[in-house]
Amino acid sequence: LASSPLLASDLTESKMVSTRRERRLAASQERDAQRQEEEVKQPPRPETPRRRARRLQKIAEEPRQEEQTQTSNTDAAPVATPITENPASASAPVEEKKEEGQTESSAAEADGKKDKEVATLKARNEGMPKSNRPWKKFGIKKRASTITRSKPLTKTWEEKLEERARKRIIKEKETALREEKKAEREAERRRLEQRRKQKELNELRGSKVVEIKDTSKIKKMNKKQLKNIKKM
């Protein structure tokens, strides 16, 4: 009777563990179903030129591997076959040989087609980068010996005279432009100075003027007062 509470607790724990396992299994099944749905929904990936080249290369390598296996089988020791009196069994190897000849001819035709496809792909990709992207085409550097020099190292006397005359004309134009700019700046400076003087004169005329006739007053004035006095 004392152990009955312990048994009840053990049962509850086992039930909890079983429910957890069931939940985990249900969650994993839901995840698998979602992944399968996503795989079905996803469209097939487009075949890039690089993948196509790899696929064609694998197709071209398959017949070579078959030929190697055939040669290895022929090089192996021959196996003795028992002689049978049944004519049907005797005609069976002939049929097998015919089938082998047909398969070899079809394989040769397939090899020819694959080789043609690979050749066309190589011809198409000549002069292109490995990524087969035309915008990554690199310019071919020319050698110094192949470059044709249109400009000689030395100049003739007539060419030198023409160059001197051209430089003289350019220099004259440059000096004329500089003098023109200098004259414009000087005219602007004079105009501003005249404006300033006219403004001062207008202010003086508009101000209240007191005429001082007694010179003794001027002698008694301090420096601040003397600054405001102007001779008319």
Image (cartoon, rainbow, N blue to C red):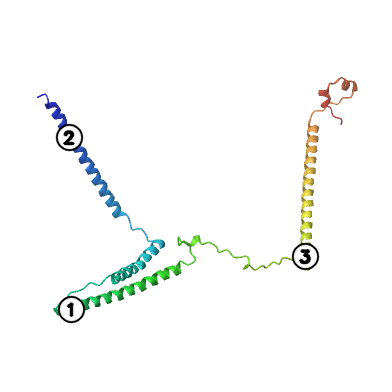
- Measured along the vertical axis of the image, is residue 207 above or below residue 122? above
Mark toward the start of the polypeptide (2 vs 3): 2
Which dot marks residue 90?
A: 1
- SS assignment at label 3: helix
Q: Amino acid at mark 1?
A: Ala
Q: Residue furthest left?
A: 1
Element carrying mark 1: helix
Q: Is residue 91 above or below residue 183?
A: below
- The CA distance from mark 2 to mark 1 is 73 Å
- Nearest the camera: 19 or 184? 19
* Residue 55, horizontal then vertical, whole percent: 36, 64
**Secondary structure of the residue carrying numbered label 2:** helix
Instruction: Name the residue tied to disc 2.
Output: 14
The N terminus, quarter of image: top left
Picture quadrant where residue 47 is located? bottom left
Task: Give left or right: position of 130 versus 65.
Answer: right
Q: Amino acid at mark 3?
A: Lys
Precedes in sequence: disc 2 or disc 1:
2
Q: Residues within 10 Å of mark 1 (few under 14, many from 20)?
A: few
Q: Nearer the viewer, mark 2 or mark 3?
A: 2
Q: Residue at x 87, y 22 (%)?
A: 218
Whether the residues at callouts 2 and 3 have beta carbons within 8 Å, the answer is no
Please tell me whether residue 104 is drawn above or below residue 168 in the rendered image: below
Q: Residue at x 42, y 68 (%)?
A: 121
Q: Which residue is mark 3?
A: 160
Q: Quadrant of residue 198?
A: top right
Residue 38 visible, this orientation: yes
